[in-house]
Image: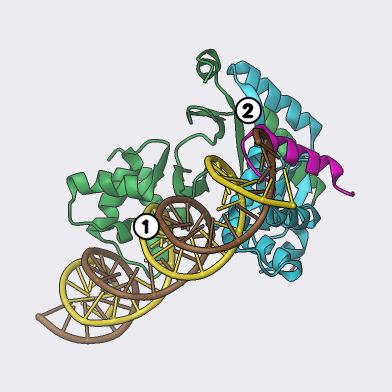
Chain colours: A cyan, B green, C yellow, D brown
DNA sequence: ACCGAAACTGAAAATGATTATCATTTTCAT
DNA sequence: ATGAAAATGATAATCATTTTCAGTTTCGGT
């Protein structure tokens, strides 16, 4: 029961709507919780298929949308036109520092920036919901190798 | 010659590569420079077509990519899978405050946040290239109307 | 445990945005 | 003016994602 809390969140969401449980959803959830920082629908599909070959890509898409609705995940899209899903629950919120050359993504946290973001929300009369911040640059290694 | 500087940037880029000028590119550029904050390729296509019905959507796509390469524009994608192009030249850099309910986008600037971002770049040994920050929330108006 | 309505699934087809192909036209240095 | 190189635009292709729909599963009420 490693992910009891996450499962509870999902089950609460399921029962609050008129939704139903299914083994597919359980399998997809398990694979998602074990996955790394930012998964593609397709990547998650491949991970699930290793253990449960019967699930379909379509169901993975649908289930990821559910995760977003219940607050377990968030959809973010980096450069190319493919959506990635990020964990929202049980992991620290973080921003991204991305190397434009090699594509490496470093997760960063900065409480001071968060404070200033809150200031912006207040100034404009917004209720904060969440944010994303991606810093693009060139990492040390790529800078050394010239190209 | 309202946009002389922007045109100069583009021409410099054109001549530095082995590229060529064309009336389509001029027309698309004009429409882009007159456009609002964040245009879709399709929106720009429609704007251009009003004055120059002969240009094709494909050329608009290609030309927008050129604008990105020469530093006049930047591609950003918000929620849905459609890319939007943002002015990079001759306009202040800005971040986004987005209402999740009505979709309104407010442009914000905060020098203090920029400073902290630079600190992050330094801490990780990155050379800064640019960033994007999107703050999601609910605006005052949407909060009032309950839904 | 059984039943049936409602929800879920997965395959195939549809969609929407973007890109590749290619024959034709345009640009530009000579 | 000429010709090579690049640009254009129509069509077709691609890629990620969504819709459709017939068959399957879930679950509350019996």
Of residues B77 and B121, the one nearer the viewer is B77
Secondary structure found at label 2:
loop
- Name the chain letter of the residue that bears numbered label 1: B
Tell me if residue A19 is in the magenta stretch.
yes
Tell me which numbered mark, 2 or 1, is placed earlier along the sequence: 1
Residue B20 percent across, percent down from the top left: 31, 66
Magenta stretch, main secondary structure class: helix
Of residues D17 and C12, the one nearer the viewer is C12
Asked whether residue A138 is in view, the answer is: no
Magenta residues, start to end: A1-21
The answer to which image quadrant residue B113 occupies is top right
Tell me the distance, in whole angstroms, between the alpha carbons under discs 2 and 1. 32 Å
Please name the residue shown 42% across and 36% down the image.
Answer: B37
Residue B68 vertical position relative to residue A133 in the rendered view, above or below: below
Please name the residue shown 61% across and 37% down the image.
Answer: A18
Secondary structure found at label 1:
helix
Left or right side of C14 for A8: right
Q: Residue furthest right?
A: A1
The answer to which image quadrant residue D11 occupies is bottom left
The answer to which image quadrant residue B135 occupies is top right
Q: Residues within 10 Å of mark 2 (few under 14, many from 20)?
A: some
- Name the chain letter of the residue that bears numbered label 2: B
Of residues A15 and C25, the one nearer the viewer is A15
Please name the residue shown 17% across and 52% down the image.
Answer: B53
Residue corresponding to mark 2: B110
Please name the residue shown 44% across and 46% down the image.
Answer: B85
Left or right side of A27 for B57: left
Residue corresponding to mark 1: B61
């Amino acid at each position: 029961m490693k992910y009891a809390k996450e499962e509870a969140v999902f089950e609460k969401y399921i029962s609050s709507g008129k939704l139903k449980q299914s083994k597919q959803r359980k399998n997809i959830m398990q694979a998602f919780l074990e996955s790394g920082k930012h998964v593609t629908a397709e990547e998650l599909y491949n991970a699930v298929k290793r253990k449960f070959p019967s699930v379909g890509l379509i169901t993975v898409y649908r289930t990821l949308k559910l995760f977003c609705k219940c607050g377990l995940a968030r959809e973010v899209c980096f450069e190319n036109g493919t959506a990635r899903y990020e964990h929202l629950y049980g992991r620290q919120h973080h921003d991204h520092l991305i190397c434009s050359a090699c594509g490496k993504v470093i997760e960063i946290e900065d409480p001071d920036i968060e404070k200033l973001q809150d200031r912006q929300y207040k100034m404009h009369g917004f209720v904060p919901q969440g944010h994303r911040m991606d810093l693009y640059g060139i990492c040390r290694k790529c800078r050394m190798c010239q190209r």
